[in-house]
Amino acid sequence: MVRSNCRTKLFMESMVNSIALVLIGRSDQIVWNMMLYEKPFRMLSFATLTTKYFISGFQVNVNAKTTKEEVSPGYDWFLFHASWTTDGFDKIDKFLLIDEWYFSSQKCPQYFDQELLPDLKIRQWYIRDKQQDQEKRLKEHGCVRDSSNGIYQKSPHL
């Protein structure tokens, strides 16, 4: 979370303009660190939020089906980062487990469009082999679609 002011707006604009570096490096962390060393941004101050306000992905275990109450009983957190995942479908599962998945016909009917749901056909076959229970749960909750109807082909190279 970045507080909005002139300097941070310029910083974030620079980050957006550097999106190619994020895509190439497969992480925004490197670009953040690089930008923070640049002269215009050396005076930016920042701190890491505590788990009282910020839940990190390592605290929600997809396999253990961690719930919101198990993660932070009594805390009023407002940010969640679905990290420590295999793919985007694991991220959806983490949001669903803690009741923070909002792209649904129940929670956000005015913007919901089933055609915009992530399609399981793009998931790698070797992940699909291991995550059948997860896929079933995500489909039952209406979080994903599957235009492959559960049929996927293993790599011919194996």
Image: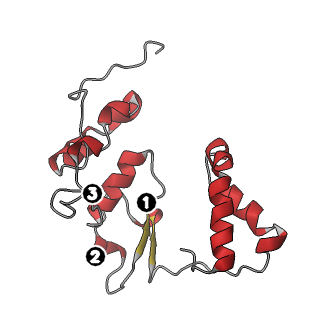
Measured in 3D between alpha carbons, the distance from the residue under mark 3 to the one under mark 2, in whole angstroms, is 22 Å
User: In which quarter of the view is residue 99 placed?
Assistant: bottom left
Residue 135: give x, y in percent of width and height.
25, 42
Residue 156: give x, y in percent of width and height.
43, 12
Helix, strand or loop at label 3? It is: loop
Depicted 62 relative to depicted 68: above or below: above
Q: What residue do we see at 47% from left, 79% from top? A: 51
Q: How is the image coloured?
A: secondary structure
Give the numbered dot on residue 82. 1
Residue named by callout 3:
103
Q: Nearer the viewer, mark 3 or mark 1?
A: 3
Helix, strand or loop at label 2? It is: helix
Q: Nearer the viewer, residue 71 or 119?
A: 119
Q: Residues within 10 Å of mark 3 (few under 14, many from 20)?
A: some
Q: Is disc 3 in contact with disc 1, using a CB cutoff of under 8 Å? A: no
Q: Nearer the viewer, residue 105 or 121?
A: 105
Q: Residues within 10 Å of mark 2 (few under 14, many from 20)?
A: few
Q: Residue furthest bottom?
A: 74
Residue 153: give x, y in percent of width and height.
33, 19
Q: Residue furthest top?
A: 156
Q: What residue do we see at 77% from left, 80% from top? A: 43
Residue named by callout 2:
69
Q: Nearer the viewer, residue 120 or 75?
A: 120
Q: Earlier in the sequence, mark 3 or mark 1?
A: 1
Q: Earlier in the sequence, mark 1 or mark 2?
A: 2
Name the residue type under label 1. Ala
User: In which quarter of the view is residue 93 placed?
Assistant: bottom left
Q: What residue do we see at 37% from left, 59% from top? A: 61
